[in-house]
Structure formats: structure tokens, C-alpha cells
């Protein structure tokens, strides 16, 4: 199983980023996929879920309207579009499947002016 996150970087407040997660080693098209993040000094938190077909997505109330999760089953890739970024969005972002697999290395997102 391999999960490789990419697309992070330094962005100014109010900016946008699109994260990607390339998956391999399991049946991606049969797995719901999730995004998580871990800010410095905090525990990892769930931030998004997409079902196997991409027809249903779920977010914590605090992120609804700013983040969008999509997937491309032909490419075994899940995406996280993040808009109107805030400094408190600074964290390492991870993806994982349901049921949970081994974690990837994550991708760092830093929101700062």
C-alpha cells in the first residue's frame, strides 16, 4: 500500500491550493477516501471524505464551503481543493482510505503572509 500526497506549499492568506494523493496497492475504486491534517502540537484531525463513486462528500462544519474533495478512479487519485486559506489551515495534510491503510509522508501546507 502506498499513499503519496503532493501539492502543498507556502500560500498567502486568502489563497488556494490543490492537493493530490496518488494511491496504489489496494482497491482504490472500492474504497472511500479521506483527507486529514495535523497542525503543529495538535493531533491529526479528519477533514474530508468522498465515497467510492464521488457522489457524496463529507466535511466538518468548520470547513464546509472552503474545501472540496474529488477523485479520479481511473488515476487512483484523490484531490483536495482548498480555497480562502487561513493561517490556521497550516498543517501537514494526509490522505487515507476507509478502512485505514498505512500513512504516507503527507504534504506541508503553510498559510502565511
Image (tube, rainbow, N blue to C red):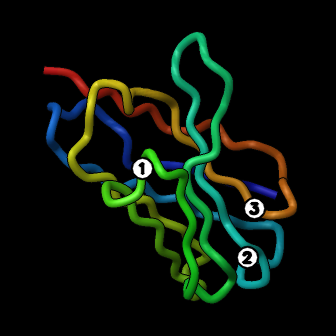
Q: In the image, is 104 to the left or to the right of 25?
A: left
Quadrant of residue 22 within the rendered picture:
bottom right
Q: Position of residue 85 (x, y in %)?
A: 25, 40
Marked residue nearer the N-terminal end (2 or 1): 2
Which mark is in front, 3 or 2?
3
Count residues near mark 2 (Cα–Cα under 10 Å), then give few for <14, some for 14-19, many for 20+: many
Quarter occupied by the C terminus:
top left
Number of callouts? 3
Count residues near mark 1 (Cα–Cα under 10 Å), then give few for <14, some for 14-19, many for 20+: some
Mark 2 lies on residue? 28
Cα distance between the residues tagged 2 and 1? 25 Å
Mark 1 lies on residue? 63
Cα distance between the residues tagged 1 and 3? 20 Å
Q: Position of residue 31 (x, y in %)?
A: 77, 75
Label 1, secondary structure: give it: helix
Mark 3 lies on residue? 97
Amino acid at each position: 500500500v502506498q499513499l503519496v500526497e503532493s501539492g502543498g506549499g507556502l500560500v498567502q492568506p486568502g489563497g488556494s491550493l490543490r492537493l493530490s494523493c496518488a494511491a496504489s496497492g489496494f482497491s482504490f475504486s472500492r474504497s472511500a477516501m479521506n483527507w486529514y491534517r495535523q497542525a503543529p502540537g495538535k493531533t491529526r484531525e479528519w477533514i474530508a471524505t468522498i465515497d467510492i463513486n464521488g457522489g457524496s462528500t463529507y466535511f466538518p462544519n468548520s470547513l464546509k464551503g472552503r474545501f472540496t474533495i474529488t477523485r479520479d478512479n481511473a488515476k487512483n487519485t484523490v484531490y483536495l481543493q482548498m480555497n480562502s486559506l487561513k493561517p490556521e489551515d497550516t498543517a501537514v495534510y494526509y490522505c487515507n482510505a476507509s478502512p485505514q491503510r498505512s500513512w504516507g509522508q503527507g504534504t506541508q501546507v503553510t498559510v502565511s503572509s
